[in-house]
């Protein structure tokens, strides 16, 4: 009897500490949705439909301003969308830990670059940074061009019929990331593996979003034993098996090619350096040196497979939707490409760097539709945000979507105006952060820009892009990334 009473008291104490302990906190002075005693805004969170979360948060920003607080029991979530605040958070050298909801992905991404923190993160970043060196990106260029030509050929075969963009473009970006960063070709795979993998990524995002809005599922034990948790486990098995096959294929190729000494001239100093064909090669070399184990390789491959294909596919999808509605922008891109490339069938890195207008177009696409609309941080060290002290344990969510649509930073923010990125200095260096910023900025942003420039330049050179319905815009939602809820259709009319 005494044991049961002590156990009940212990459980009650834990519940009180987690849910109901309510210390004074300076951020409580900030505005936000009305809070109920003890539970705060937990009831509002429970009632949020997953596909409406983005709309609701945008409404809160419009109502409460650049800073507002959402409270769930004793947890404070500080939402920010003002450039000075965004700079303070993203440039902080110590508060680099991702917020708690990212932990929901650990079964999939483990301690890969996206989720890790501290010394572990620094070590992985150091291993992976050479993957995106300029010379390595030059070696990727021919693969990206080859995949783009395959895409052009496939679209020509459509004979001007409506094309559903997202499934088409995500195939292209998945094949591209696998052959560049992973050194593995997928195009010849006639099984349903790629379809299953893409569906798994979509399901993981939806399941994570559903878990965020159901606070009782935040506990791993409860979630893992729920019907959603069991479904999530099955989905993870599909995603992880796909990545494991990519790793095993590359290991087999390396064994087969062992002993070959392929060298390239380093363009910066003329010194012969061993050619690293892929990010996966760097990881496998690090494994041979004892710097990473196979679980670590799997975590990084899963991370890059997701981040390297899904985010770029979404940016290209939204971009083609916008270009279809703006024939004048298409024609200006076409004229720029003709001036730079003429009749050449090949696009070099130098050609891409000369495409200043196309770069402005891509920046404007990412302003309106940032692939990652929010970034979350768990504060591990007290810091000052202007005149407010943000205490350890607080979650801070950076709202990139709303940041990019501020009228004081971008006049007529809802309009698609690429010229706003031509020769004009940004009003604030942190008003535009599509690839994040600071120490945790996106390691693959140069690769992403290279792929998007190559793809859009080639598509515009070969096609006039026409909308199925002029001015149509899909409903959008946020899970792991910014997604269209409705299909987006355009026509590719050969020039």
Image (cartoon, rainbow, N blue to C red):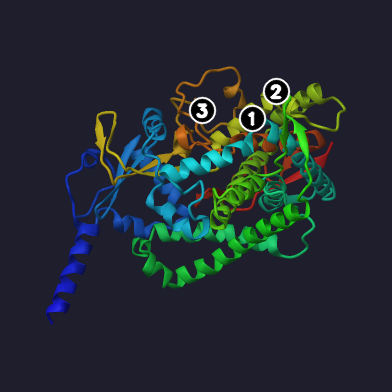
In the picture of the structure, the residue carrying the numbered disc 3 is 412
In the picture of the structure, the residue carrying the numbered disc 1 is 361
Q: Residue furthest right?
A: 343
- Whole-angstrom CA distance, mark 2 to mark 3, is 47 Å
In the picture of the structure, the residue carrying the numbered disc 2 is 269
- Whole-angstrom CA distance, mark 1 to mark 3, is 16 Å
Tag in front: 2 or 3: 2
Residue 73 vs 398, above or below: the answer is below
Q: What element carries label 2?
A: loop
Q: Judge left or right: residue 269 versus residue 203.
A: right
Q: Judge left or right: residue 333 versus residue 26.
A: right
Label located before the other in sequence (1 or 3):
1
Residue 187 vs 398, above or below: the answer is below
Contact check, label 1 and label 2, Cβ < 8 Å: no
Contact check, label 2 and label 3, Cβ < 8 Å: no
Task: Check the picture and name the quadrant holding the N terminus.
Answer: bottom left
Q: Is mark 3 on a helix, strand or loop?
A: loop
Q: Residues within 10 Å of mark 3 (few under 14, many from 20)?
A: few
Label located before the other in sequence (2 or 3):
2
Tag in front: 1 or 2: 2
């Amino acid at each position: 009897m005494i044991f049961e009473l002590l156990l009940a008291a212990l459980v009650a104490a834990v519940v009180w500490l987690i849910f109901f302990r309510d210390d004074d906190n300076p951020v409580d002075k900030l505005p936000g949705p009305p809070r109920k005693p003890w539970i705060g805004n937990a009831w509002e969170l429970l009632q949020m439909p997953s596909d409406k979360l983005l709309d609701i948060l945008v409404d809160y920003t419009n109502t409460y301003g650049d800073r507002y607080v959402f409270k769930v029991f004793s947890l404070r979530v500080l939402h920010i969308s003002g450039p000075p605040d965004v700079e303070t958070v993203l440039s902080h050298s110590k508060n680099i830990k991702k917020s708690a909801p990212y932990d929901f992905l650990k079964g999939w991404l483990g301690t890969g670059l996206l989720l890790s923190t501290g010394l572990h993160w620094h070590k992985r970043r150091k291993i992976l940074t050479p993957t995106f060196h300029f010379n390595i990106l030059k070696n990727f260029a021919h693969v990206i061009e080859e995949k783009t030509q395959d895409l052009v050929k496939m679209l020509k075969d459509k004979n001007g019929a409506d094309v559903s963009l997202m499934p088409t473009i995500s195939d292209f970006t998945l094949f591209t990331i696998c052959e560049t960063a992973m050194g593995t070709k997928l195009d010849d795979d006639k099984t349903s593996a790629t379809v299953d993998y893409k569906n798994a990524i979509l399901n993981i995002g939806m399941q994570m979003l559903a878990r965020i809005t159901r606070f009782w599922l935040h506990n791993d034990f409860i979630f893992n034993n729920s019907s959603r948790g069991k479904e999530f486990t099955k989905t993870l098995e599909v995603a992880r098996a796909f990545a494991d096959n990519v790793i095993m294929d590359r290991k087999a190729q390396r064994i087969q090619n062992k002993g070959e000494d392929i060298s390239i001239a380093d363009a910066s100093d003329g010194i012969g350096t061993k050619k690293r064909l892929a990010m996966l090669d760097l990881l496998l070399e690090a494994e041979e040196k004892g710097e990473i184990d196979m679980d670590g390789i799997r975590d990084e491959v899963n991370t890059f497979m997701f981040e390297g294909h899904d985010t770029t596919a979404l940016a290209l999808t939204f971009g083609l939707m916008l270009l279809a509605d703006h024939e004048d922008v298409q024609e200006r891109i076409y004229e720029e490409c003709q001036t730079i490339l003429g009749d050449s069938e090949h696009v070099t890195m130098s050609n891409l760097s000369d495409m200043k207008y196309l770069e402005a177009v891509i920046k404007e696409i990412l302003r309106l539709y940032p692939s990652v609309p929010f970034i979350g941080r768990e504060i591990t060290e007290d810091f000052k945000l202007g005149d407010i002290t943000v205490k350890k344990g607080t979650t801070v969510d950076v709202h990139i979507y709303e940041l990019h649509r501020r009228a004081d930073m971008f006049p007529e923010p809802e309009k698609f105006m690429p010229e706003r990125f031509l020769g004009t200095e940004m009003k604030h260096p942190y008003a535009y952060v599509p690839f994040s910023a600071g120490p945790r900025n996106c390691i693959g942003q140069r690769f992403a820009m290279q792929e998007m420039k190559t793809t859009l330049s080639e598509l515009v050179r070969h096609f006039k892009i026409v909308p199925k319905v002029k001015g149509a815009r899909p409903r959008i939602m946020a899970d792991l990334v910014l997604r269209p809820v409705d299909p987006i259709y355009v026509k590719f009319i050969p020039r």
